[in-house]
Amino acid sequence: MYGEGPHLRDTRPKNRVLALGSAGALVTATLLAGAVSAPTAGAAERHGQDREARGAAIAAARAAKAGIDWHDCPADWGLEKPIQCGWVSVPVDYAKPYGKQIKLAVDRIGNTGTKGERQGALVYNPGGPGGSGMRFPRRVTTKSALWVNTAKAYDFVGFDPRGVGHSAPISCIDPQEFVKAPKADPVPDTEADKTAQRKLAREYADGCHERSGGMLPYMTTPNTARDLDVIRAALGEKKLNYLGVSYGTYLGAVYGTLFPGHVRRMIVDSVVNPSRQNIWYEANLEQDVAFEGRWKDWEDWVAANDASFHLGTTRTAVQDKWLQLRATAKKNPIGGVVGPAELISFFQSAPYYDSSWVPVATTFSKYFAGDTQALVDAAAPDMSDTAGNITSENSNAVYTAVECADAKWPTSWRKWDRDNTRLNKNYPFMTWANAWMNLPCATWPVKQQTPLHVKTHKGLPPVLIVQSTRDAATPYEGAVELHKSFKGSRLVTEKDAGSHGVTGLVNPCVNDRVDAYLLTGKLDTADVTCAPHATPKP
């Protein structure tokens, strides 16, 4: 999954290991496959886009007239005053703007500065697909130091994208069944193991269709971008100020392509490669390689801090401990509930986020010091957390629905098997877990789209792109590709760093440029390379 920072961690499913796709893609041949000739298919695609563009304009005009009826947020949403909540209606199908409507949940907190300082609303998406942005206004109520200056100028606005949370949520399986432990080892030993996983993937795809079939054809990134424009209109904003992280960068890239003249300021942080050939199959394969690299970075750090963790003084020694732990959990799930799948779900947060380096290493260390319960507490699914389980299941359903609908995926198991077997030899940490998570797309029960060609159109202002070079979830090449696609953009690179979600970290070289852009619109005259933020300390 492509998503930013600690506030998403509690929503991560524990039984299907997450992969960013947030934050992968199809090969060209697959994208072009089909019975319709290319020119005819292109004409049909353009006709459909024209209808949807007209529908989006109708929906936006309607929303601008209606506005948003702001009120105190429901008590069980966990959003304290003065944050306010409201709803924005959008069509399920933009080709039929007067057809079935759904309501999207939005929230806001007003700017903290004067009326004269206010520059409008800053709308946020944290990634996924499947992440909720509703906690964004809490950066103001919790007085997050990084956002004090921006909060003076902007209302902070979050929303649940279509299908997520409070916005017509979709589902693919009973939430309690979704988190039930233990799970099989994602790394297959035999053909029978692969057959079993393929069966689960087909059943999951079928479950999505049975439980949410009416929404599935419309769970696409372009539709979410159209929703974003309707939200802009409902807020009374002529132009959008937007911050997108992880998958939120792809949403921003699609929005900037569809609505270039509606963008005022846009920051994209930890970037999904928007190439049509990359969305989404190839992106997930590239992710497997990047995760392995960042996993090794973490192991090097653990080894360098052996005085604190006692797991070995070399990367090889730390890796041996990891393999020993996996083997133990595979033979007998630890505490009866933590098997290899649960281990990967827990340990993957270390290559995702530097903020997880210390807690994951500490739990790892405690296990080998004889404290098994610490690992069980950290990695086992919480079967009693009904609300959390619903959120996890919903988040995974949206992730699957959007990535499967956005692009045509390979349907040949031989291709999946060949590609992942090859990758697993050198990049074993996430490869098979990622494959099984995405395999429902091979048998997806509704039509899969051709990804939008992300590019610069007239009216698009300069976009600020922020990226670390060692990011596991969204490899650096994605930022380079979007930089090429969006002419006039500026790329701020955090060199030799790899935490996902750079704008949420303390690094003045990055933070000052984010503030300057949002507050004044100014960008450096050339791309910038920043030194890494501080390495975590035990």
Image (spheres, rainbow, N blue to C red):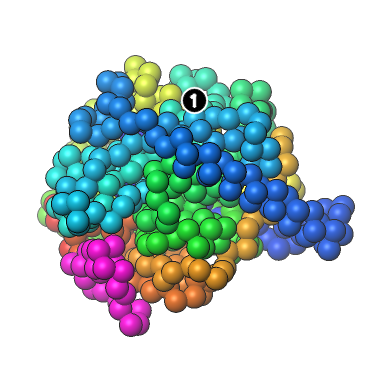
Residue 341, image quadrant = top left
Q: Nearer the viewer, residue 395 or 464?
A: 464
In the rendered image, which residue does mark 1 sit on? Answer: 178
Q: Is 247 within the magenta?
A: no
Q: Nearer the viewer, residue 313 or 229?
A: 229
Q: Does 531 sit above or below residue 274?
A: below
Percent across and percent down for residue 392 are 43, 30
Residue range (magenta): 508-533
Say which amino acid is labelled 1: Phe
Percent across and percent down for residue 508 are 18, 67
Instruction: Please report the residue visible at 56 percent of the width from the left and 69 percent of the height from the top.
Output: 457
Viewed as shown, does residue 394 lie left or right of 526? right
Instruction: Please report the residue visible at 80 percent of the width from the left and 58 percent of the height from the top.
Output: 43
For the residue labelled by badge 1, is the local secondary structure a helix, a strand or a loop? helix
Observer able to see residue 368:
no
Percent across and percent down for residue 412 are 74, 48
Q: Does 87 sit above or below residue 473?
A: above
Observer able to see residue 388:
yes
Viewed as shown, does residue 413 lie left or right of 465? right
Instruction: Please report the residue visible at 38 percent of the width from the left and 18 percent of the height from the top.
Output: 386
Q: Nearer the viewer, residue 154 or 142?
A: 154
Viewed as shown, does residue 390 lie left or right of 85? right
Q: Does 492 sit above or below residue 321?
A: below
The extreme front residue here reads 65
Q: Is 509 within the magenta?
A: yes
Percent across and percent down for residue 489 are 42, 73
